[in-house]
Amino acid sequence: MGYRSRVDILFYANDDKDHATLKLYLEENLPQEKFFEWEEIARAQQKAFFIQLEDVKWYESYPDVQKVMEVFRFIDDEVGNSWQYEFVRLGEDDNDVEVRSSNDPQWYLQVIRAVELHF
């Protein structure tokens, strides 16, 4: 069955022109399978593209995961601060948390651990 994770990814740009260019880039470079559907979201002055994957095998040897990692590398190495990404992977184990981000993130994605009583 394999080890499963939850993965959340947020991509955003600094302005509307960069947002449109980012959208085109993501359409051309992210996997287009149903598994990787993303939604465009907006709040106040910020627009973003959001991916949320539940119960996914996130192995860097998988071709679709490699495509996402290539997008991260492109943003890190080629784009500068006009595009941003935030990535969080929560594994099955409580201490298995991976967080990555681009150059100057806003930290819209946050991992919060909490204990709740449901009696």
Image (tube, rainbow, N blue to C red):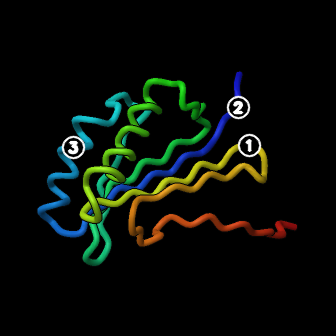
Would you say 12 lies left or right of 18 here? right
The label shown at residue 3 is 2
Residue at x 62% of width, y 51% of height: 98
Would you say 7 lies left or right of 29 here? right
- Identify the mark nearer the N-term, 1 or 2: 2
CB-based contact (under 8 Å), mark 1 and mark 2: yes
The secondary element bearing badge 1 is classed as loop
Q: Is the residue 94 above or below the residue 81 in the image?
A: above
The residue indicated by pointer 3 is 25
Q: Amino acid at mark 1?
A: Glu
Residue 101, horizontal then vertical, whole percent: 46, 58
The label shown at residue 27 is none
The residue indicated by pointer 1 is 92
Residue at x 67% of width, y 53% of height: 97
How far apart in space, not on screen, are marks 3 and 1 (Cα)? 32 Å
- Identify the mark nearer the N-term, 3 or 1: 3
Residue at x 47% of width, y 70% of height: 107
CB-based contact (under 8 Å), mark 3 and mark 1: no
What is the quadrant of residue 31 in the picture?
top left
How far apart in space, not on screen, are marks 3 and 2 (Cα)? 30 Å
Residue 12, horizontal then vertical, whole percent: 31, 61
Residue 99, horizontal then vertical, whole percent: 57, 56
- Identify the mark nearer the N-term, 3 or 2: 2
Task: Name, please, the residue furthest toward the front.
Answer: 77
Q: Amino acid at mark 3?
A: Tyr
Q: Is the residue 106 above or below the residue 37 in the image?
A: below
CB-based contact (under 8 Å), mark 3 and mark 2: no
The secondary element bearing badge 3 is classed as helix
Residue at x 45% of width, y 51% of height: 9
Q: The N terminus appears in which quarter of the rendering?
A: top right
Q: Amino acid at mark 2?
A: Tyr
The secondary element bearing badge 2 is classed as loop
